[in-house]
Image (tube, grey):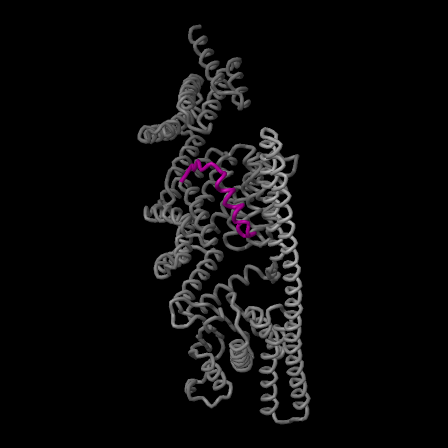
Amino acid sequence: MRFYLLFSFLILTINCTFGQDNSYLRRVLDSIKTEQNTGQKARLLYVAAKSYLEKPGELKEDLDSALWLNSRSQKLHLAENLKTDAALNMLLDARIQEEMGKPSMAKSQKEASLHFANKNQLSKASAVIYLSMANDIKDVEFKQKTAFFEQAIQQAKKAGDKLLEAKILMEQASSLSNYGSYPEAIQKAYNAALLKKQNRELNISQELVMIAGNLRMQLRLKEALKYALQGKAIVENERIKTSKDDMAAVYNIVGLIYYDLKSNKEALENYQKAFEIAKDKGDRYAVHTVTLNLATILSRLNRTADALNLLNNVTKDYATDVYAIRYAYLYTMLYTREKNTKKAFPYYQELLKYYKTGNITGQERHIMMVGISSYLFADGQIKQMYPYLEEIERSLNKESSLLRISELRKLYYLADSARGDFKSAFKNFTAFKTISDSINSVDRAKELTALQLDYDTEKKDHDILLLKQKGQLQKSLLEREAIIRYVFIGSLIILIIFAGFLYVQNSIKKRSNAKLTLKQEEINAQNEKLKQLIAEKEWLLKEIHHRVKNNMQIIISLLNTQSAYLDNADAISAIQNSQNRMHAMSLIHQKLYQTDNLSRIDMKWYIQELTDYLKDSFQSENSIKFEIQVDPITLDVAQAVPVGLILNEAINNAIKHAFVQRTGIVFISFKRLKATPFDLILSIADNGIGLQKDLDSSNSDSFGMNLMQGLTSQLDGEFKLTSDQGVFITIQFSQKEGEI
């Protein structure tokens, strides 16, 4: 009787301290007080103890409650000879000791539970304990971890518990995925789904998420999306019992796959659904996972500020080092994208700290090295990038993720370009594009060019003037009110004097305003005349450029007509070359009369237009691909014409001679340099057959070669040509003073 009263009092105390926000646990505690069956009461005590252990916050009173409830449950299980449940009580006790910060006691208790289970041939309990011991092993100790998983599976099979076996297989699949063994992880998850179906369990959404996630890592995106959408159909089917955890995981993986497919709208929608579900459930692990993904898609959509705001508003209650690493990585990437290395630095330091510990493996170590490399590139520390890039390359030999290989080739390309190794940069860029093209087989729409806004300076000045006048008027009114008060306090004489003073002041002000108004009208009239003169000048310049362009087009047409009467192939080729050169110059004049800027050429537009024209001229679009990388650079006509003619010659030569009945790539780069004798570098490269080994570019009798060298001299630049598995042409020169 005393025991029953004490027991009821403790249950009541626990129930009251728990609060009003967990109705499930309250119902369990209420059921314990009324349950008459000893075995059922023991199981309810176990459920309550587990619920207290899994409450967020790890409060001492919650852990003490869990320990007491579990102890009572174990005694009742032993009294009813329910040894399997008693073994699980011992395992739960070990978990509670871990949460209390007593690892040695937890380890000995877990070993005692395994000994008890094996001694009494409790296969199901042994399977659960081996699974717990496997999860305790770090990923770096992969063989020992795998051995525990296999022992757990054997015990589950021996017990004939298919659902438990499926659970163990899923835990092993997760471990294999973290280690990079994606095919094995897929097979384990697939086997788990089969076991559930054999047990007539309809909810296999977790297994489908695991399969889709590992297919995604292998870039088998079409298959991954198929399994992910099957999982989505399950969680959205009201007839199948699922949890919020299942829904959040499914929407998250669907969002990830749409992200990889660059379907940004669908990715964002699914991430938002997953985030709302995780937030509503209060699952901090899911909230962190989806927050990181949401921030990533926002960054891709150029909503960097929204991404940072999202990250900053999430409580950083990291449960493991995994989230700390991923937050540090994402902050680093977002700030380096904004070229704010100062704000990225502390997160880069955090990545370095975890990197130096050496006990982080799998995906986390990969993203650490990518984040560190990206920061070093943004900070200009190019040489320091290569050790990390080489380590990434070594680690990729153990796994088959094309996403990571593509990411590595891009980092190598950026590093090589920055240090001036254009041959290696071209090689890595080609590899990156090959993988990227295999990922995205459908061409994406071209980015829209930014529109430039013109501000009405005259209107702004007028608004400022009106504000000043209002301020002066208000000041005058205040002064007038003060004087009126003094007049009423003073005498009539002061009032008369003041009235006279106001009259004089008002007259002076009117005369001044009249003079200012007259001057302003004169200024406005002069401004209108100047605007007309400027407009006429601009119209004349545009007309000149238009007529020059038309005259060049007439010459091109005449050359085309002349070629129709020629039978000599060399003569026809010479005329065609002349047509292309005339078109290269014609484009410049066309751009000048089509835009408001009559003196400078946008080289990004010009190079793209010239390349498109030459592709159409030689009908090479299907066999030769062009990759163009051009910084925002504008040149005046004196420099744009030589550059255009050089480009024309180099691209002509590549199209005609580099690819003999085969496909290839022509790479065009126009970049601004730092810390070199020249400001600009123009590179034209191809992966064709190259030049003849005995051909000397400096002594060549080729007109095109001599023309390019002569035009480079006209630019006061430096011309280089190398031939190794293709032709590499570089022209370095500087913009003249006052032309930047």
Residue 105 location, x and y as percent? 32, 28
Residue that protrudes farthest toward the top in the picture: 1
273 relative to 535, above or below: above
Q: Is residue 516 left or right of residue 400?
A: right
**Residue 118 sits in which quadrant?**
top left
- 283, 99: nearer the viewer: 283
Residue that protrudes farthest toward the left in the picture: 104
Q: Is residue 143 left or right of residue 452?
A: left
Decide if residue 426 is in sight here: yes
Decide if residue 660 is in sight here: no
65 relative to 273, above or below: above
**Residue 656 sits in which quadrant?**
bottom right
- 730, 599: nearer the viewer: 599
Q: How many numbered marks appear?
A: 0
Q: Quadrant of the N terminus?
A: top left
Q: Is residue 202 left or right of residue 347?
A: right
418 relative to 186, above or below: below
| Residue located at (56% from left, 33% from top) | 280
Residue 587 location, x and y as percent? 61, 76
318 relative to 367, above or below: above
| Residue located at (52% from left, 41% from top) | 192
Residue 235 location, x and y as percent? 61, 38
Say if the magenta span includes residue 311: yes
Residue 448 location, x and y as percent? 61, 60
Q: Is residue 736 left or right of residue 569?
A: left
| Residue located at (42% from left, 57% from top) | 378
Say if the magenta span includes residue 65: no
- 486, 639: nearer the viewer: 486
Q: Which residues are magenta?
A: 299-320
| Residue located at (62% from left, 61% from top) | 445
